[in-house]
Amino acid sequence: MIHFRNATNADFNLAFQIKKTSIKPYIAQIWGWDDDVQLEFHIKDFNPEKTKIFFDESNEAVGLMVTSEDDTNIYLQSLLLRQNAQGKGLGTKILRELIEQARSRSKQIKLQVFKVNNRAKALYERLGFITIGQTVFHDEMICR
């Protein structure tokens, strides 16, 4: 059973550790991983008001999700699961709940996924996301 809570400023280091144990391989593949550079990005980007921290049944923090929204869209800015929590259905469960929430509010979900992250892209496609564009490093996807 997974549960979540809203992040606080005190979760800054936890959120950075989750990032390191989830997407570091993809960032390293694209740009190379540099702790100092990634910490600077994290300082700039961390927003606890938009972040939920996920916990497993033993109350270990296993991931986070960052979202924002406007009148018509929910923007999934990040869905990060520690490597030891991946492949267990948690991402699917979290995304299905987000999709249900979006549909009940007549909103669509938009996101970007690293092109090199085939596993995440396959998950999004399996749940009904389609590719609508791309950047140099990302596929842009939507779920209506």
Image (cartoon, helix red, strand yellow):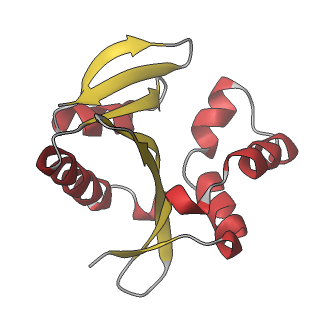
Question: Extreme bottom residue here?
Answer: 58
Quadrant location, the C terminus: top left
Residue at the location (76% across, 44% down)?
38
Residue 137 can be seen, yes or no: yes
Foreground residue, 143 or 105? 105
Residue 52 place in picture, x, y as percent = 46, 64
Question: Extreme right residue here?
Answer: 36
Quadrant location, the N terminus: bottom left
Residue 6 place in picture, x, y as percent = 48, 71
Residue 59 place in picture, x, y as percent = 44, 85
Seen in the picture, residue 84 relative to 142 is either above or below; the reply is below
Q: How many marks?
A: 0
Question: Extreme front residue here?
Answer: 71
Q: Is residue 34 left or right of residue 123?
A: right
Foreground residue, 7 or 114? 7
Residue at the location (21% across, 46% down)?
102
Foreground residue, 65 or 121? 65
Seen in the picture, residue 137 relative to 4 is either above or below; the reply is above
Foreground residue, 64 or 126? 64
Residue 19 place in picture, x, y as percent = 61, 53
Residue 80 can be seen, yes or no: no
Residue 69 picture quarter: top left
Seen in the picture, residue 27 relative to 96 is either above or below; the reply is above
